[in-house]
Amino acid sequence: VVLAAAGGGSCKVVHFVRHAQAESNVAAAERGHSAYRDETWFDAFLTDHGKQQAIKLGFENSEKLLESQLVVCSPLSRALQTACLMHQSATEIANLSTDVKFSVPLELVDLCRERLGVNPCDRRRSIAEIMDVHESILESSPFSSIETSECHHDLVD
């Protein structure tokens, strides 16, 4: 997750945030790195612990989040959930609307995700599936930077 905030003069301040704990991370910790190759973890979601991590990040960084001019995020579910939970907790601490939808522009960008292509957890859903799975948090279509609607299964360079 990348947050672009206003800086002094013509500078921008960029904050990078790694996604919180995903189901695939737990599987790999329990069964070894080969667990990442299990189709069960296709575009893995956050664990309950990962959701709490994202909420905590939002509380701890609420000022930075609310001053952001743009949020750039991987279209993978774990990254999108992290960004949305951070934003929601930041707005709650500031006593703003608790609406889950973003108050700053959100752009989903394929180049922000893992690009190895061999692990199912690093492959994204189609745009239609992303909108369907995450419709409660996506107000509009933040996909102008995504070149194709289809899932990417082989982004190996």
Image (tube, grey):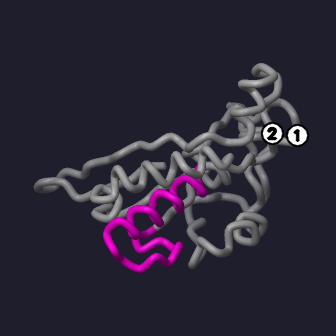
Magenta-drawn segment: 79-105
Q: Is residue 60 magenta?
A: no
Nearest the viewer among 11 and 33 is 33
Residue 27 circle label: none
Residue 99 location (% of width, % of height): 50, 78
Question: Mark 2 or mark 1: which comes first in sequence?
Answer: 1
Does 20 sit left or right of 87 as displayed?
Answer: right
Residues 100 and 16: in front is 100
Question: Farthest left residue?
Answer: 9
Q: Horizontally, is 41 left or right of 79 in the view? A: right
Query: Does the residue at mark 2 contact the one at mark 1 (Cβ under 8 Å)?
Result: yes
Q: Give the camera-side residue of 79 and 48.
A: 48
Q: Mark 1 belongs to which amino acid? A: Glu
Secondary structure under badge 2? helix
- Note whether 118 is above or below 100 in the view shown: above
Q: Amino acid at mark 2?
A: Pro
- Looking at the image, which residue is at 50% across and 40% down? 18
Q: Identify which residue is drawn at 60% across, 65% down.
A: 143
Let me know if residue 94 is in the magenta part.
yes
Which quarter of the figure has residue 122?
top right
Quadrant including the C terminus: top right
Q: How many neighbours does mark 1 have within 10 angstroms: few (below 14), some (14-19), or many (20 or more)?
A: few
Q: Is residue 9 left or right of residue 138?
A: left
Please identify the residue farthest to the right as the structure is shown.
Answer: 39
Q: Which residue is mark 1?
A: 39
Residue placed under numbered mark 2 in the picture: 120
Q: Position of residue 100 (x, y in %)?
A: 53, 73
Between the residue at mark 2 and the residue at mark 1, the CA separation in whole angstroms equals 5 Å
Q: Residue at x 60, y 57 (%)?
A: 81
